[in-house]
């Protein structure tokens, strides 16, 4: 391996796509257990590598030189092998600082809580200290090495103003987890989470629910990678390159989730949109039929709506973890907040709103068999469609017109990520 990433578990990583989009080399993901890690570092068979959990501190004894900033932080995430020597750097510091500045998060004179006390936390702590925070509290389950316990945080520090998650809590595949409950921190003004997979963690969803500004970790990941490539190749990539690459990676990872009434055109639009954008097409109702080997009406007859909704939730939880898909959902998916939370973690929600007189009844749709029921359903569900939608598209014209309108709105939405994180 010439260039790559080492860590214990790398199934969540986007680093290969980022590096290979930026530089002309093959970038490998190299998961290592502790025994393999030590053998790998002793062998020194690489040109340059990045380091992630749990080895950012463990690599230090193997290095011949450590950059001054990295030495102060006490953790390294970038190593360059040059002239027979290994030199370590910390671009997590630069990446997190970039993210703070980009999103105008002011920490000076603020009380800041950092969740986690590993290698990434060390870099974040250094940035926060350099930004003149009024008070910095670090919490971890072990409450060691300067960190306090969660019990002490809840007892003494509910007045924190900035909360930063550097722990792996909530990272793929454990996307339902959150390190804390923001409801217990009424003074919180901003939440940052350095996790990038999923794009929005459960902590981030909660922040958005309470109207607290949230920044996810994808932009930090891209920024630290760009700074690492500068060390790898003696290059001089700039912030403009970070912006460009961030938008590219976001476009490649995000899902487009279509919601709307039965017969609003979700499945037809999803098929055409996926072809036009070279994305994977998925339909939650089709996945239910395929997985459970029953038609939707059969499930309703045998198990009722409650049984169907349970199956729907399981399927949505599964497909929501994927990337770069166009997902058509059942008309009632919005009735379950768990569904919408799952879909929002990696997706942008698009509401296809068709005029009620254009909606059609269908005997195969158990809940929309006649016009009166359909109208009542529309009135009941409309507030939920509007609540969850990021983009709303009127679908009263032909298929091509609707697909074009969605693509136009999506391009504008992605472009706006320069100034506002997902």
Image: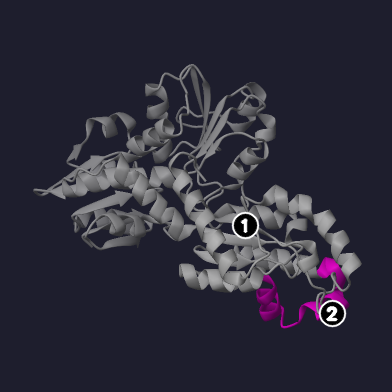
* Residue positioned most to the front: 397
The answer to if 304 sits in the magenta stretch is yes
Residue under label 1, please give it. 350
Residue 262, given in percent of the width and then of the height, sits at 76, 68
Checking the image for residue 363, the label placed there is 2
* Residue positioned most to the right: 372
Q: In the figure, 121 relative to 23: above or below?
A: above
Q: Which residues are magenta?
A: 284-307
* Colour scheme of the picture: one colour
For residue 3, side relative to residue 34 (left or right): left
In terms of depth relative to the viewer, which is nearer, 49 or 31?
49
Residue 138, given in percent of the width and then of the height, sits at 50, 29
Q: Is residue 232 visible?
A: yes
Residue 286 location, quadrant: bottom right
Q: In the figure, 63 relative to 101: above or below?
A: below
Q: Quadrant of the N terminus?
A: bottom left
Predominant secondary structure, magenta span: helix
Residue 296, given in percent of the width and then of the height, sits at 78, 77
In terms of depth relative to the viewer, which is nearer, 6 or 313?
313
Residue 29, given in percent of the width and then of the height, sits at 34, 61
Q: Is residue 59 visible?
A: no
């Amino acid at each position: 391996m010439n260039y790559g990433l080492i860590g214990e578990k790398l199934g969540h990583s986007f680093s290969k796509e980022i590096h290979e989009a930026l530089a002309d080399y093959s970038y490998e993901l190299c998961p290592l257990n502790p025994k393999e890690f030590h053998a790998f570092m002793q062998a020194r068979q690489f040109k340059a590598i990045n380091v992630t959990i749990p080895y950012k501190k463990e690599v230090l004894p193997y290095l011949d030189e450590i950059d001054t900033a990295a030495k102060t932080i006490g953790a390294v995430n970038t190593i360059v092998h040059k002239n027979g020597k290994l030199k370590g750097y910390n671009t997590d510091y630069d990446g997190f600082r970039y993210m703070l500045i980009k999103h105008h998060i002011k920490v000076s004179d603020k009380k800041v809580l950092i969740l986690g006390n590993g290698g990434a936390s060390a870099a974040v702590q250094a940035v926060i200290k350099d930004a003149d925070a009024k008070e910095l509290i670090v919490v971890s389950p072990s409450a060691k090495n300067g960190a306090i316990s969660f019990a002490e945080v809840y007892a003494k520090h509910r007045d924190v103003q900035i909360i930063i998650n550097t722990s792996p809590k909530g990272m793929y595949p454990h996307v339902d987890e959150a390190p804390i409950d923001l409801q217990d921190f009424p003074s919180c003004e901003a939440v940052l989470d350095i996790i990038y997979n999923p794009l929005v963690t459960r902590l981030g969803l909660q922040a958005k629910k309470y109207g607290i500004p949230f920044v996810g970790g994808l932009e930090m990941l891209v920024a630290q990678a760009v700074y690492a490539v500068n060390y790898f190749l003696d290059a001089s990539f700039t912030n403009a390159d970070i912006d460009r690459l961030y938008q590219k990676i976001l476009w490649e990872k995000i899902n487009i989730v279509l919601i709307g009434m039965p017969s609003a055109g979700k499945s037809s639009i999803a098929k055409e949109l996926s072809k036009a954008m070279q994305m994977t097409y998925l339909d939650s109702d089709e996945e239910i039929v395929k997985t459970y080997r029953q038609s939707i009406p059969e499930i309703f007859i045998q198990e009722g709506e409650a049984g169907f909704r349970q199956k729907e939730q399981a399927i949505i939880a599964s497909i929501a973890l994927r990337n770069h898909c166009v997902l058509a959902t059942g008309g009632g998916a919005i009735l379950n907040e768990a569904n919408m939370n799952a879909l929002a973690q990696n997706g942008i929600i698009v509401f296809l709103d068709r005029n009620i007189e254009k909606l059609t009844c269908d005997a195969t749709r158990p809940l929309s068999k006649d016009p009166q029921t359909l109208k009542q359903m529309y009135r009941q569900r409309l507030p939920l469609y509007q609540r969850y939608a990021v983009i709303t598209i009127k679908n009263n014209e032909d298929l091509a017109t609707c697909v074009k309108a969605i693509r136009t709105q999506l391009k504008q939405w992605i472009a706006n990520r320069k100034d506002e994180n997902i």
